Image: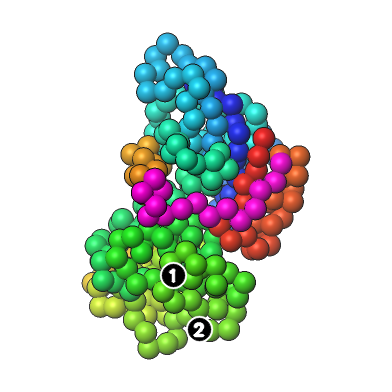
Amino acid sequence: MLIKIRATTAAAGDCELRSLNFSFGLRVLVRLLMGLSRPRRKILGQELAGEVEAVGRAVTLFGKGDRVFGTTGIGFGAYAEYICLPERSRGRALARMADDMTFVEAATVPTGGLEALHFLSRAGNLAGTKVLIIGAGGGIGTFAVQIAKHFGAEVTGVDTPAKLNPLLSIGADHVIDCTREDRTGSEERYDVIFDVVGQSPFSASLATLSREGRYLLGNPRLSARLRGTLTSPTSRKKVIAGASTQRTEDLVILRGLIESGKIRAVVDSQFPLERIREAHRRVEAGLAFGKVAITL
């Protein structure tokens, strides 16, 4: 399908890949996969919303004029006016937009929403549980707060001072200022800790979990991933890490939650494509609450 892109986003993953802002080991791996001296992928952009311009003969799920949103997977390419994508493929998700969503709103849903849904679903039944979300004000965290609340959890969001009141406005029951309070040193116990940003102290976080708690690592350091493999077999507490799956079925679930008013897209700001540098700077500075959109 040929899709005319109307909006995309400055996702944290785009910023990290552009600047190679990874640990040394991961930076080497990324260079091996994406190009040693120069990147094989010339155009960034992981998520999009737009209109189907044309379809191939084998396409059956979409037609010309359909409004769609989704992810491009490791192929990237959404920072462009047009993109060609298959209607279904592993590692990508593409679905029709909700009727009342704008292109900007729809573009901010896929990667953050899919990541949040993936990890929280793996934590088991959340009804009546206490959930701590570290990095709750970002593109993944704002969806995680809303999805956890939808599943019946009592949610505590951790982030910088400017994001605390906005977190309460999207449903967080409690908030913690990460610049002033020790999020793992209190006597409070949580059934689930979801570290979106990979900055929680491993041992202290495990100690803060309830007896059969779940520690979700959305962006784990290599050391945390290795320690997690040693912890889970020997404890009733479980460490869950690894890459999320991007599936069209889950994107349809997110669309349904949005259509029913259970969750909503959180758009921090929007920039035209020619000001994309400013969009990336805002994300890298940690100023954005929700997602930064880019319009075409």
Q: How is the image coloured?
A: rainbow
Image: 34 above or below 236:
above
Q: Looking at this rendering, what residue extends furthest in the top direction?
A: 57
| Residue 265 drawn in magenta | yes
Q: Quadrant of residue 173?
A: bottom left
The crowding category of the residue bearing disc 1, from other C-alpha atoms within 10 Å (few below 14, some 14 to 19, many at least 20), is many
Disc 2 crowd rating (10 Å Cα; few below 14, some 14-19, many 20+) is few
Most extreme residue toward the front, as rendered? 100
Toward the viewer: 191 or 9?
9
Q: Horizontal and vertical percent for residue 273?
A: 71, 39
Marks 1,2: beta carbons within 8 A: no
Residue appearing at x 58%, y 49% in the figure: 11
Q: Nearer the viewer, residue 182 or 239?
A: 182
Position of the C terminus, as image quadrant, is top right
Magenta-highlighted residues: 258-272
State which mark lies toward you, 1 or 2. Answer: 1
Please tell me which residue is depicted at 65% across the width and 53% down the height of the picture: 269
Lower position in the chain sequence, tag 1 or tag 2? 1
Task: Check disc 2 and report its element: helix, strand or loop.
Answer: loop
Question: Going 43% across and 39% down the picture, which residue do you hit?
Answer: 98
The disc placed on residue 182 is: 2
Q: Secondary structure at mark 1?
A: loop
Q: Is residue 20 visible?
A: no
x, y percent for residue 201: 47, 75
Amino acid residing under circle 2: Asp
- Locate residue 246: give its quadrant: top left
Asked whether the viewer can see residue 98, the reply is yes
Pointer 1: what residue? 172
In the image, residue 211 sits, relative to residue 26, either above or below, namely below
* Residue 205 position (above or below residue 14): below
Name the residue rendered at 55%, 57% in the picture: 290
Horizontal side of 60 relative to 169 (left or right) equals left
